[in-house]
Image (tube, rainbow, N blue to C red):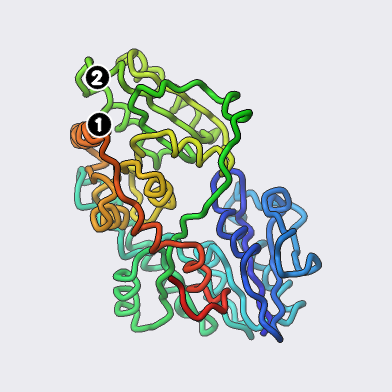
Amino acid sequence: MNILICDLNISRSGHNASYAQYIVDNLTVNSGEQISFFFNSTARIMIDISKSMVAEEHFIFTQRDFIQDNLVGRLKFREWNLIKSLAAELGIDHLFILDLTRYEIQISRSTLPYKISGIEFRPSHRIRASNGSFPIRLQAKLQRLKRIFFESILLRSKSLTNVFILNDETGVNQLNRRYHTGVFKHLVDPVFDYNKLNNDAIVKLPKINKNKVKLLLFGAMDWRKNIQNIFNALSLLDPSMHPTICLLIIGKVPEYYLNEFHIMLTEFQSRSPLIEVIVVNDFVSNNHMEYYFEISDISLLVYAKFYGSSGLVGRAAKYGIISLVSNVGLMAEMCVNYRLGYVCDPNSPVDIKEKILLAFSDVQKKIKIDGFKFISDHSPLRFLHLLGFSNQTSID
C-alpha cells in the first residue's frame, strides 16, 4: 500500500498543524507500506519530522505557500494539480487529505486511479440558526444549502472512500442517510498534550492578577469570535463586578479586521474602564496556549455563525475551566452532554451576560467542571486509530 498524506494549509494563523504533527510523530508504518507526506512551504518551520517512522526523503514540501488573493487562487486548482502530479509520480494507492473541504470541486471533476479520504471540517448538517434575527437565520439557511451543494458534488467521486467528521457520531449517521452512502465516518477531535512554559518564559509575559476572575478569548481574533457581542455583554454586568474581572484576548488579529477590532476595543474600554483587558496580538505557541488556559477561569467560545467543533472545548476541559459556547451547532451538544459549562445565544448580549454571571458564581464558589470523560473520549491515540494510522487493536 502506497499512501500520500497531504496538507497544504499549514499556517501560523491557527493550530491546524497539530493534527499533522501528531500523525507524523505517531503513525505506524506496516510491512509493505510506503507513506509519504506532502506539505506547503510554511510547514518546514512548523512540522518537526525528526521523530517520525517515515524517512526524511518521503517528506515533500512546496516551494511556496498559496495565497488565495483572486478567484483562481481561491478555487485552489494550482494546489490540486500539484497534489495530482505528485500522486502520479509516486504511484499511490490512497490519498489522505487533512482538509478535504478545500478540494471538493476538484475531486469531483477528477477521474483518479487511487482512493481518497480526508477530514471534513465544515459539514452541512449542523448549520441551523435557531435564534437571532431573520437575516441571521436566512444567512445560516443559505450557508447550509451551499454546503449541501458542495457535499453533493464531492460525493460524485468514485474514488472517495472515507469522509471523517469531527466529534459527531449522530451527524455521521444523518449524513450517510441523507446521501445514501457509507463514506462518512466518525473521528474524535483529539486533545493533545503540550509542554508547559518554564518560569523564565512566564516572567516575560504580561502580569496577570491571580485574584481576578479571568475570562479567556483565544485564537484568531476575527469576526467568528463574536467580539462585539462579548464586549457588550461584559459592559452589561453590574459595575461593582468590573474591578474583579480580567479579560484575556490572546491571538492574532488579521490585518483586514485590525481597524474594526481596535474601534470595538476602544469603545469597550471607554464604557467599562474598570474591566482589565490584556491583549496579545500574536500567534502564540502551543506551550503558551497551555499556559493561558491553565491560568484562566472561563473560556469564551460564543462563536458567531459557526456550527462545528472546536479543539478549544477540549483545551478548557483539560484544565477544568468553564466553557461558554453558542447554543446552536455541535459545541452546544458537546457542552451539555459532557457538562462542560453553559450555552447561550451568541446574538444576545443579555443572554451572554446571564451565562457569564452563572460561570462567575461557579468560579467564586471554586466549582470546576470535570473534563475527565471528555478527555478520555477524545484521546490522540483514538484519533490516530480511527484514521487507520495505528495498528493497535483496541484503544482504552
The kind of residue on which mark 1 rests is Phe
In this rendering, the answer to whether 69 lies above or below 251 is below
Q: Find out whether the residues at labels 2 and 1 contact each other: C-beta distance under 8 Å.
A: yes
Question: Tag 2: residue type?
Answer: Met
Q: Residue at x 73, y 52 (%)?
A: 44
Image quarter where the C terminus lies is bottom left
In the picture, the quarter occupied by the N terminus is bottom right
Where does label 1 land, which residue? 360
How far across and how far down the image is residue 321, in percent? Answer: 35, 41
Q: Nearer the viewer, residue 102 or 363?
A: 363
Label 2 and label 1: CA atoms lie apart by 10 Å
At a point 37% along the width and 49% down the height, the residue shown is 317
Residue with the mark numbered 2: 241
Residue drawn at the location 29% of the way across and 46% of the way down: 369
The residue at 67%/69% (across/down) is 83
Q: Secondary structure at mark 1?
A: helix
Count of all numbered marks drawn on residues in the image = 2
Q: Quadrant of residue 277?
A: top left
Residue 150 in sight from this viewpoint: no
Q: Residues within 10 Å of mark 2 (few under 14, many from 20)?
A: some
Where residue 9 appears, as percent x and y from the top left, is 60, 55
Does label 2 or label 1 sit earlier along the sequence?
Answer: 2
